[in-house]
Image: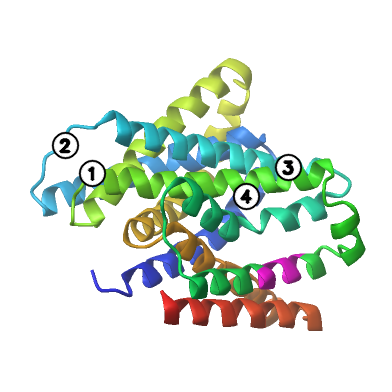
Amino acid sequence: MDTWGWVYLTLMASAAQAVRTGGQKHLTRHMSTFAVSFVRFVYGLPFVVTYFAFLLYAYDKSIPVLTLRFLGFCLLGGIGQIFATALLVYLFTFRNFAVGTTYARTEAFLTAAAGALFFSEVISLQGWLAIAISVLGVVVITVVKTNVEHSSLIARAWNKAAAVGLASGLCFALASLSIREAALSLGDDTVLFPAALTLLTTVLMQSIILGTYIVIWERQQIAIMAHEWKVGAFVGVTSALGSIGWFTAFTLQNASFVKALGQVEFIFTLAISILYFRERTSPGELLGMLLVVIGIIYLLIVA
């Protein structure tokens, strides 16, 4: 795969994620947070299995021995995604949820910091600057769209919503880094195959964990999932496509760079609101978009 492969895959993943979010929002009207997350994994699993089986045949491979290191990082990445999503949804129960959401948007920077501290990811000064610029753009967009006063971000820097937001961003960061570490631990230079095996293993673990929780604590949600199978299938397909893009991109490039480029999703969302829904864009949103674009272009130059 060429050196720009991670860019194409990240753009595909970001677009799929933006579309998937619409389906998940529909499901949240009828289901709990964990049930919606379970739908994403259990309905996406058949597509992930099909994709892995295709690669298994295409590369004429057999399933390798799965080491404890590989399984451990898959488990850490899977649990990280589950908790990150739950914490993000939990933010909406706070009156000042917008402040916490703003902090959660620092995920790319947190990924870079955690990667440098715990995963030996080497990032140049220019790389740090590119990530910082793109993150600043996302924060500006979030502040403007959620009407967070600048004084609130400073005065409430250590409140509960901010802590939950940072915890969500950190869980997403650790999940991304763990997924990359799991795929690389396989030592397979085909890229697509180790990424697919990591994805399949992680989704299986997530399905088992959340499935067990649903059966024990939220059994009534199962009937709703079955009734909403059409939307569930849509969420499953888009989730599988997005995950294939993310997991493969993580295998090719530093997780922090992938996450920084992935913030182009905010540009997609704003572009849809402007072009399709004819919504007005404020100067603050335009400034945020400009910063994100500058950060991404700079990142592509230095990566």
| Residue closer to the observer: 243 or 118 | 118
Residue 303 visible: yes
- Mark 1 to mark 2: distance in Å? 8 Å
Q: Which element is circle 2 on?
A: loop
Front disc: 2 or 4: 4
Q: Residue at x 51, y 65 (%)?
A: 262
Looking at the image, do the residues carrying marks 1 and 2 touch, with CB atoms under 8 Å apart? yes
Secondary structure category for the residue under label 3: helix
* Residue 264 drawn at (x, y percent): 55, 71
Residue 157 image position (x, y, % from top left) = 83, 52
Q: CA distance from mark 2 to mark 3?
A: 38 Å
Looking at marks 4 and 3 on the same chain, the residue that comes earlier in the sequence is marked by 3
Q: Earlier in the sequence, mark 2 or mark 3?
A: 2
Indicate the amino acid at tag 4.
Gly
Q: Which mark, residue 164? A: 3
Query: Which circle's residue, 2 or 4, is located before the other in the chain?
Result: 2
Total marks placed: 4
Q: Quadrant of the N terminus?
A: bottom left
Residue neighbourhood size for the residue with mark 4, other residues' Cα within 10 Å, grouped as few (<14), some (14–19), many (≥20): many
User: Which residue is located at x 80 percent, y 66 percent?
Assistant: 143
- The question of residue 140 being in magenta is answered with yes
Three-letter amino acid code of the residue under disc 2: Pro
Q: Earlier in the sequence, mark 1 or mark 2?
A: 2
Residue underneath mark 4: 169
Q: What whole-number distance in Å separates the C-alpha atoms at marks 1 and 3?
A: 34 Å
* Circle 1 residue: 186
Q: CA distance from mark 1 to mark 4?
A: 27 Å
